[in-house]
Image (spheres, grey):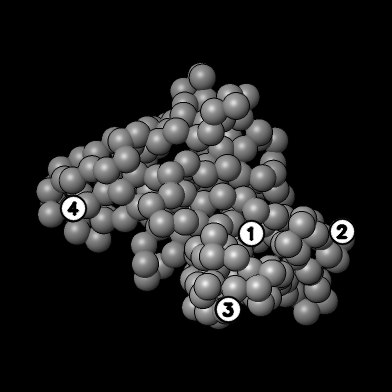
Amino acid sequence: KAGVTQTPRYLIKTRGQQVTLSCSPISGHRSVSWYQQTPGQGLQFLFEYFSETQRNKGNFPGRFSGRQFSNSRSEMNVSTLELGDSALYLCASSPGGGSTQPQHFGDGTRLSIL
Amino acid sequence: GENVEQHPSTLSVQEGDSAVIKCTYSDSASNYFPWYKQELGKGSQLIIDIRSNVGEKKDQRIAVTLNKTAKHFSLHITETQPEDSAVYFCAANSGNTPLVFGKGTRLSVIA
């Protein structure tokens, strides 16, 4: 069974630009969660989608948004990029039905803002 | 909301020795506690998890213990090997709430 696939693996952008990251969950998984990982803050929850609906949202500004498609693939968008958005963005999928199910992570997208 | 504290932040052990990483949580409603291993340049891999209805779970050289009264849980790795070197994260949640992660422990196994 293929794992969680995130594209692209690396991305370099400049301040003020916008970026879209993609996540393909494990086949059959309906829940996709996004996290931001930085050395100082660790893993911080961005949002979770289940059956194309946002089920949970973390404490990030509205510049961070996401969506989920009918095939469970998810995208995350960050607009008006800031230097502080430089981080590893991870997505994780789970079967769904409740957050206390094992989540499986992709290898992440490393975003660098110049 | 939930808050998870993880200690130590770095840990060095000799190959063959045991390693223990401890986490505390604040929300007594939390009932799911996974542990993840993150190797350099990769995402996090689920290595073991425990639910609040059990006190201990083992999987070969890895074990997790949970003390609900004290609100802490620990990861135990026995007979450590160089390939165990990685960053380990604990997490906690309940119901439909998001996972809350500890800040991570960098484990180095010295051959």
Q: Residue at x 71, y 69 (%)?
A: B78
Q: Chain of mark 1?
A: B
Please identify, in this view, whether the residue under mark 2 or under mark 1 is nearer the observer.
1
The label number, if any, that marks residue B35 in the structure image:
1
Which residue is rendered at x = 83% and y = 64% of the image?
B56
Chain of the residue under the numbered disc 4 shown in the image: A
- Identify the mark at residue B53; answer none if there is no mark: 2
| Separation of marks 1 and 3 at Cα, in angstroms | 22 Å
Quarter assignment of residue A50: top right
Q: Are marks 4 and 3 on the same chain?
A: no
Q: Are marks 4 and 2 in contact (CB under 8 Å)?
A: no
**Whether marks 4 and 1 lie on the same chain:** no
SS class of the residue under badge 4?
A: strand
Q: Three-letter amino acid code at disc 2?
A: Asn
Q: Earlier in the sequence, mark 3 or mark 2?
A: 3
Are dots 3 and 2 on a single chain?
yes
Alpha carbons under labels 3 and 2: distance apart: 34 Å
Callout 3 amino acid: Gln
Q: Earlier in the sequence, mark 2 or mark 1?
A: 1
